[in-house]
Amino acid sequence: MHDTQEPLRERALLIGLERPGHDKWAVKDSLEELRELAVSAGAEVLDVISQKRDSPAAATFIGTGKVEELAARCRDTDANIVIFDDDLSPAQGRNLSEILGLNVKVIDRTELILDIFAQRARTREGKIQVELAQLHYMLPRLAGLWTHLSRQRGGVGSRGPGEQQLEVDRRRVQEKIHRLEDALDEVRKNRRVERGGRQRLHWPLVSIIGYTNSGKSTLMNKLTGAGVLAEDKLFATLDPTARKLRLPNNQNILLSDTVGFLRKLPHHLVESFKATLEEVVDADLLLHVVDVSHPQAYEQSKAVEIVLKEIDAWGKPTVVVLNKIDKLEAGATALEKFQREFHQAVPISAKTGENLDALRDEVANRLKDRRVDVTLSIPQDRAKTIALVYRSGYVIAREMEDGNVVLRAQIPKVLAGELTPYVVDESK
């Protein structure tokens, strides 16, 4: 027999806290983003509820009266999941679960993001990073996960003081965290090997960064034909991709796409994904993609800057890419605002391809000082050296002279020193 029933869809209520001194619109925007996250995770959002409080309640985050109202709302709407816009302490999560009942799951923003990441991870690296972040999140909350944790094990070999089951579970989780961290170290080593291979090509690395759903993957596909999944949802892609791109001045670069950033991105999540974000740290140039059509585009760009500071990538040469200009209404001032602050920002539409030539030209202009024009005279039997020039640079002309291959080429500056013995001094 086969079960033909569809799995029960999660019906969600979203909860936020509005505090004096905080921008009311910021709370509204944060809850709207939480709605997008919930939908992206596959939930049906029934209602959004907020409460005004000076500070979160220690026991239940929201006030006791609001909790009772929330419980009644869950019964009336058949909601089976409640999502809080801020992180809940282990005690708050446990207390809320007891009040709302076993049929209602209580999670916070971090747990929701982790769930989305778990759905989207495809590579071994991505899966390890997500599981590691989930275990770090779970560890302080173990006491609320099982009913047997306060008991001691009985039977042969466990008489006497014994060991609480909670400690056993904690130790197992910590052991698994150590194993995953070791596996992640192996991933980092492999990445360093890959990076070393790329560096031997002497191609500049350009990383696409930006707020989630700003159009990074669409831009990557349009520029390189990478075939990266691009959907109108938060965190549609999680695993990094790198592709070769030849610029209008015939310079080769490696273009990489990275995981999207987000406001209130949990610190331990950033820590777990540092292996992926190393692409950003090592980049020669960043393309910061901003969804200029979004009402909170400026705030989103600032959230990206915060994460860059966390991963020590702040201050790198950056091209601000103002994406989705095709969605701007006539008379919109958002584009002008960004262009006043970022004078060299490039407005584009990754979806339609509008102004992508200008973006390619700007990238080429920012990287032009990394190449030099040279004339090289290389013995014909030095095939590897000749191949290196073709692979890493751009050959403008080639001819034979006295048994040597004479190449007029543009090569990376870092390669010029290695090829010094073959450089022709044309002034003589």
Image (tube, grey):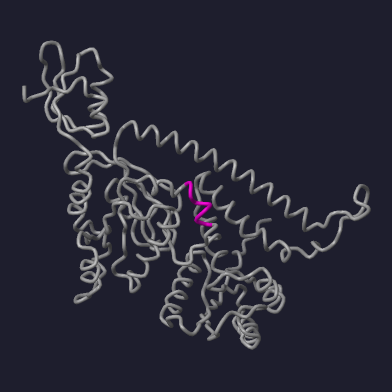
User: In the picture shown, does residue 114 fall above or below 278?
Assistant: below
Of residues 226 and 291, the one drawn nearer to the viewer in this rendering:
291
Q: Residue at x 15, y 33 (%)?
A: 373
In the picture provided, is 380 more to the left or to the right than 269? left
In reply to whether residue 61 is colored magenta, the answer given is: no
Of residues 318 and 355, the one drawn nearer to the viewer in this rendering:
318
Q: Residue at x 24, y 59 (%)?
A: 352
| Outermost residue toward the left in this view | 428
Query: Residue 52 in the image: x percent, y percent?
Result: 53, 86
In the picture provided, is 371 more to the left or to the right than 159? left
In the picture provided, is 344 more to the left or to the right than 271? left
Number of numbered labels in the structure image: 0
In reply to whether residue 273 is colored magenta, the answer given is: yes
Quadrant position of residue 200:
top left
Q: Residue at x 35, y 65 (%)?
A: 301
Query: Residue 90 in the image: x percent, y percent?
Result: 67, 68
Magenta part of the protein: which range? Answer: 269-275
